[in-house]
Structure formats: C-alpha cells, structure tokens
Image (cartoon, helix red, strand yellow):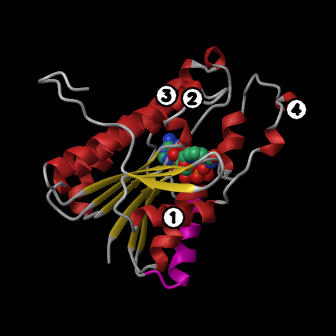
Amino acid sequence: MANVMITGASSGLGASLAKQFAARGDQLLLIARRELLLAELQAELLAAGAPSVEFRVVDLADEIQVQQLADDLPKLGVDVLINNAGLGHWDLSWNTSSEMMRTMIAVNMSAVAVLSLAFSQIKHEQPARLINVASGAGYALFENSIPYSASKFFVTALTEGISQELSTNKLMMRAQLLAPGPIATEFMINAMQGSKIDMENVQGMDKIKFHTPEQMAELAMQLYDSDAVVGAVQGDMTFELSGGLHKIGQLVGGEW
Ligand SMILES: NC(=O)c1ccc[n+]([C@@H]2O[C@H](COP(=O)([O-])OP(=O)(O)OC[C@H]3O[C@@H](n4cnc5c(N)ncnc54)[C@H](OP(=O)(O)O)[C@@H]3O)[C@@H](O)[C@H]2O)c1
C-alpha cells in the first residue's frame, strides 16, 4: 500500500486520480485550495472503502505554503508524489497579464520544482515515485497558449532530467511525466476567463476532442504501472508510452 500525495485533487484529473489510487487500496493525501470539494471527495472515497484519505488546504501560488508542504514531506511519509495542480490562460502572449503569468509560474513551475526536488532529496534511494503532470503543450507550442506552454516545457525538462539522473545513478526512485491532451474539466473554462480572444469566432473549437478526467486518469495509471518515463496523449488521442524526448548532454566533451 502506497502513501500517495496528489496536488490539484479538488477537481478534474486530480480527483479522478485520487479515485484510481483509492480503488487500489492506497492511502491518500489530497492537496488544493477548495476545502469543501476536498472534504466531499474525502467522504466519497472513505464511503467507497478507501483505507485512509487526508487532505490539506494549500495555495500552491504562495511560496511560503509550498515551502511548508515541502518541509513536511518527510513526516508525511509520502511514497508517490503527483504534481498535478495547474492552470492555463488562453490568449495571445501580450494579452496575458503579468499577474496571470506570475501565477502560472508559481503553480505550474515553482511549486512543481520545489516539491519535486524536496521529494527527490529525501526519497532518491527508495522505491518512491514522482509523477509530474505537464501537457502536450509541454512538448509543442499551441496557438493562444504560449505562456502556458512555456511553463509546461519547464515541467517536461525538469521531470525527464530528474528521471535520467535517477537512472544513470542507479537509484531506486523513479520520475515520470504525464502529458495529457485536452481533458473535459474546469481547466479550459478557467483558462478562457478574461481572454481577449473572441471564442465564438475561433475556427474548429467545436472539433477539439477531449478525454474525460476518468479516461485520462486510467491512462495515467497505465504510465504508473509501466517502466516508461513519459506517457503522452497524441494528436489522434492515442496514448504513447516512451523513454522520453529530452536527453541530458555532456558538457565535458561537448556531446549535446
Ligand atoms: N484540461 C486540459 O485540457 C489539460 C490538458 C493538458 C494538461 N492539463 C493539466 O492537467 C492538470 C490538471 O488539470 P485539470 O484539467 O484537472 O484542471 P482543473 O479541473 O482546473 O484542476 C486543476 C486543479 O489544480 C488546483 N489548483 C489550481 N491552482 C491552485 C493553487 N494556487 N493552489 C492549489 N491548487 C491549485 C485546483 O484546485 P483548487 O482550485 O481547489 O485550488 C484543481 O484541483 C493541470 O496541470 C493541467 O495543466 C490539463
């Protein structure tokens, strides 16, 4: 039985991931800001037979709260850390406010980095698992989401890099990267809030194909159960498991 901490567990993919791990009999620590949703999910999972479900209200945009959570990781006894919380903004780059950009950097990048590194520091010699949730937009730029894509490129580079360092140093901990395509969650609705893009006139919006959060969580479990480094949804909605795309170059000898 693993002790699994999931950020962004109050809705969407995070809540569906919590259900998947609870169904396997794992212990859960759920992280997000909306306490009521966390409490409702806790009650639902416990009623369905989950052995242990705790939650903690944390604003991952607040660096002090993130550091506190990172400092508490040893006593929380987490074996599997899933950095899933994230947000986007659908707009041209120059119409993305500096406040929005700072929030994306804080939640999508800083919190992921601080928690990933703190977890790796205490767990690298143990059979622990880090799973960071990026996006297809963490490998390719998509229209009207350049600042978001940039924040997710950071996550793919960080996670694949940690994974390679762990394996080249023959350590037991593993790091994996989940790159979903569009998921039918609150994410897109929130990302379009305050956008200057005229959604009514964006060609092809009605043709975007979405996974449900439940489907995406099932694909995430395929990644979790595999030896792959990356699980990525492709343009045709298939799910590809691979060894990853970023390779660590050698500064000495100039091989990159
Ligand atoms: N939906 C998509 O199309 C899509 C596609 C590719 C990748 N992704 C990625 O998938 C992940 C999950 O997104 P989703 O689709 O499930 O969206 P969602 O339903 O909007 O969930 C986002 C989660 O992140 C949490 N969160 C956001 N800001 C936070 C903050 N400041 N502090 C703590 N928690 C915060 C939210 O909880 P609270 O609001 O309660 O804090 C919520 O639980 C994200 O990393 C996203 O970038 C989504």
Q: Which mark is residue 220?
A: none
User: In which quadrant will I find the C terminus?
Assistant: top left
Q: Is residue 186 left or right of residue 54?
A: right
The residues bearing labels 2 and 1 have C-alpha atoms spaced at a distance of 26 Å
Mark 1 / mark 3, whichever is N-terminal: 1
Mark 4 / mark 1, whichever is N-terminal: 1
Residue wearing tag 4: 200
Disc 2 versus disc 4: nearer the observer? 2
Label 3, secondary structure: give it.
Answer: helix
Picture quarter containing residue 162?
top left
> Is mark 1 in CB contact (under 8 Å) with mark 3?
no
Main secondary structure found in the magenta portion: helix
Q: Which residues are magenta?
A: 33-50
> What amino acid does circle 4 point to?
Glu
Label 2, secondary structure: give it.
Answer: loop
Residue wearing tag 2: 141
Residue wearing tag 1: 17
Mark 2 / mark 1, whichever is N-terminal: 1
Location of residue 154 in the rendering, given as x and y in whole percent from the top left corner: 40, 33
Tell me, yes or no, whether the highlighted magenta stretch contains residue 40. Answer: yes
Residue drawn at x 33%, y 43% as measured from the top left: 160
